[in-house]
Image (cartoon, helix red, strand yellow):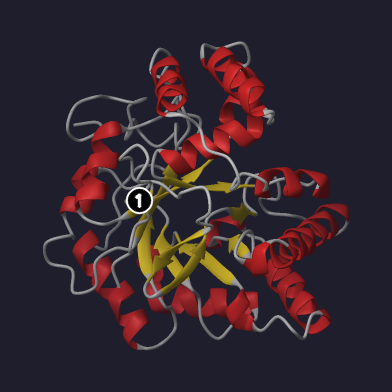
Amino acid sequence: SRCRRCRDDTNGETAVPRNMQHCVVAGRPIPAIGFGVGTAWFAATPGPQQTELARSVHAALDAGATQNAGLSICHIDEAEMYQNEGTTGAAMSAWLTANPAMPRGSLFVTSKVMSVDDGIESVCKRTLAALQLSYLDLYLIHAPFQRSGAPFATPLPEAWRQMEALVDAGLVRAIGVSNWRVADLRQIVDSARIPPSCNQVEAHPYLQQPALMRFCKEHSILVTAYSPLAPLTKPALHGGPVDAAVAAAAAVHGRTMAQVLLRWSLQTGRLPITTTSKPERLGEYLAIFDFQLSTEQVQAISAAGALKPQRFFWTKCGGQFKDDPLEEEDSAP
């Protein structure tokens, strides 16, 4: 169940090479870009918001199926906490019905459990029912603690044993974690019967977490990155030091700044999870596999981001995270 990581032989960094559009998790491809349905459609209400979410899921699946035999953005990233699994499930079901040439196996669907203390199996089964699926390709523990930052009543090693049981039962194909720090991962990696396949974390040039990246690489844990376009989407970062380095690389390659940031994510070993409500952006996001940043361009973006570390998610959980510390744990003591 370990992830076979992709390697970019041109600069020695763990990455997705220019012609590699997927990695492998638990023996099957995971598309190299995921489509997230959380932030923009969190707790989507009936009416226009749910309609837009369904339309966006259809557009993402259409784009992924059209480009390169469906290896990109046929990857939907969901979560119990997003409170919109029913809308996403109905949208995926309708899309599969309308596209009979695309079987369920052409999709890669991730979800996450937050209500760990409710029993992970019961939460997973509710998610499967809402998504209208018989199994998940990847299932993650959404955080190593409750949303408040308080610990779960269930110890993390026990929670992980419950995750392993889901694989045994055929409810999920691969398991992993999200927002876990080195100290959290250390609680399970040595005793895990099925090692975590991935760790999904906030990651962009302004939040690089080098110690966490090293630990995940050493333990063959794929890092997936949410908010990879933060320098463009977060007003607080507009005009920051990363802009010049990204713009310079974009000019050299004739690409957009978004494409450069997604490429930076891949070439530094992070599989990006991004989103948009604009179908035309999907083609832009997918057109990143026919060029490659130079080592110098990657390093320039990384160095610029390190000048202004900043986290945007999980900032109200009792100080569990520091911005981007350089010490071993990448977390609060």
Do we see residue 292 in this rendering?
A: yes
Check the image and report above or below for 248 versus 148: above
Check the image and report above or below for 252 versus 52: above
The x and y percentages for residue 146 are 38, 50
The quadrant in which residue 251 appears is top right
Q: Residue furthest bottom?
A: 169
The x and y percentages for residue 148 are 41, 43
The foreground one among 117 and 93 is 93
Do we see residue 233 in this rendering?
A: no
The x and y percentages for residue 328 are 17, 32
- Residue that label 1 marks: 7
Q: Residues within 10 Å of mark 1 (few under 14, many from 20)?
A: some
Check the image and report above or below for 85 versus 321: below
Q: Classify residue 194 as left or right of residue 128.
A: left
Three-letter amino acid code at disc 1? Arg
The residue shown at (40%, 12%) is 307
The residue shown at (69%, 62%) is 64
The residue shown at (79%, 77%) is 94
The quadrant in which residue 70 appears is bottom right
Q: Looking at the rendering, in which quadrant would you find the C terminus?
A: top left
Q: Classify residue 310 as left or right of residue 322.
A: right
